[in-house]
Image (spheres, grey):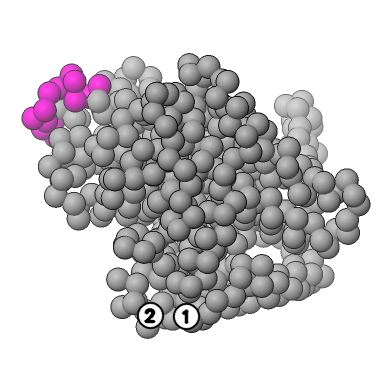
Amino acid sequence: MFGRSVPLAHSLLRNVPAGVGLRRWASTKTLRETLQEVIPAKQEQLKKLKAEHSQTVVGEVKVENIIGGMRGLKAMLWEASVLDPNEGIRFHGLTIPDCQKVLPPAPGGKEMTAESMFWLLLTGRVPSPNESSQFSAELAEKAELPAFVENFVDSLPRTLHPMTQLGMGVAALNHDSQFQAAYERGIKKSEYWTYMLEDCLDLAAKLPALAARIYRNVYHPDKAIAPVDKNMDLVGNYSNMLGFGHNESLTEYLRLYIALHGDHEGGNASAHTSHLVGSTLSDPYLSYSAALFALAGPLHGLANQEVLRWQMAMQKEIGESVSHENIRDYLWKTLRSGQVVPGYGHGVLRNPDPRFIALQEFCKARPELQASSMIQLVQKTAEVAPDVLKEHGKTKNPFPNVDATSGCVLYHYGLTEFKYYTVIFGVSRALGALTQLVWARALGLPIERPKSYSMDALEKLIKN
Ligand SMILES: CC(C)(COP(=O)(O)OP(=O)(O)OC[C@H]1O[C@@H](n2cnc3c(N)ncnc32)[C@H](O)[C@@H]1OP(=O)(O)O)[C@@H](O)C(=O)NCCC(=O)NCCS
């Protein structure tokens, strides 16, 4: 798949913005060398924007933006991806299908690796297979957890939600933050990003070991955890440590899910949290730990476990042979009870989520998934729900989002503990959030401080 896509890759990369460069197929530059190359151009771009356009108006602020969760406000700089309401996400100009064609897979696999996506997000360049595998090796080298973090996580009660454990474990890793130590020593502002990068790589490398340890502690405490394999990609190792290394289909699914879920521009709650906390010059461990607690909310990352719970309840109530009519009735029952339909709607998107489409394509290519009654139910629900939600008339986007299908595939392949699903999302979303922390420091972005108003002050503002 990868070899065949070379000419296509070049045409796709025409969309990559100026300054981020084209792929060098035989290149073996390190990530640091590549960043050293691309950062000056971006710094220059920002300098020019500031000098020439600081006072240019690009939108307006309405009262509905202020009271409506800042939706639609153009108010953040975020480098790695931009979300178009109709077309969906683009990573440095590349769509999900583009990425599936040009990003290198793991040896023996077909799906793009998390590290090739991470490289693209960080540098704006598609890594060569050599660069990607060297990057895998570097991350595997850093993957083991410090003993005190292992002991800390092992001491947590099994009944503590896995997301709470993940956030606490990530925060504890800041014990070894290079950025924090360098800041205390008194480094120059222009050097911030280099230490930030080291911490971000360290955290991305260690997240799978931490997340897998939590899974094993909570659900399979009697089984030993596989050690990190230095020759394996990030997700291959994650799957192995979870205890699913033998399950190539699940490992491939995890690769796809983790890569395509890695970033969704900056305004979503977890990404924005990480950016906000990072803007205070907190280190990446503390910044991303805070982001994980935003991800743990049911309207954000927890939706993937909610979807499965909801679809299972539907299956239990109406049985295995389900008609569109049955599903329609069940959807109305959910809506009339005042609940949201999990897996549908989006804060920005106004069309079916291309991440949902990519995961559906994965399912369609696998006979065992097509035969699963749960996957069939998800597909049938997606055929009925948009019309019901349109008739209901509230949601601005009646189409399925990525979570409509993500958990059901994990369940089919034997990862059945759905309280854990948001942790996998947390491993994935680090790719984008950590990328932005590096860029925010490389570009010298300031501490965030938007203006707030009380209702009285707002009314006064309206009068004047
Ligand atoms: C994702 C989500 C939080 C976006 O919220 P939002 O930006 O406020 O969405 P909208 O502007 O379309 O919301 C307008 C109204 O439609 C409702 N709505 C949105 N999605 C809905 C859904 N799937 N089912 C029922 N009602 C929905 C909202 O609750 C809101 O109702 P309100 O006016 O009574 O408060 C929302 O669509 C949702 O709750 N979806 C279900 C959970 C989910 O799948 N989350 C994962 C997202 S990737």
Q: Residues within 10 Å of mark 1 (few under 14, many from 20)?
A: few
> What are the residue bounds of the magenta stretch?
313-325
Residue 408 to residue 81: above or below: above
Residue pictured at 66% horizontal, 67% vertical: 32
Query: What residue sits right under mark 1 in the picture?
Result: 25
Horizontal side of residue 37 vs 319, given as left or right: right
Q: Quarter of the image holding residue 70?
A: top right
Q: Is residue 99 magenta?
A: no
Q: Quadrant of the N terminus?
A: bottom left
Q: Amino acid at mark 2?
A: Val
Report if residue 329 is visible in the image: no
Main SS category, magenta section: helix
Query: What residue sits right under mark 2 in the picture?
Result: 6
The disc placed on residue 99 is none
Horizontal side of residue 223 vs 173, given as left or right: left
Q: Residues within 10 Å of mark 2 (few under 14, many from 20)?
A: some
Residue pictured at 58% horizontal, 31% vertical: 150
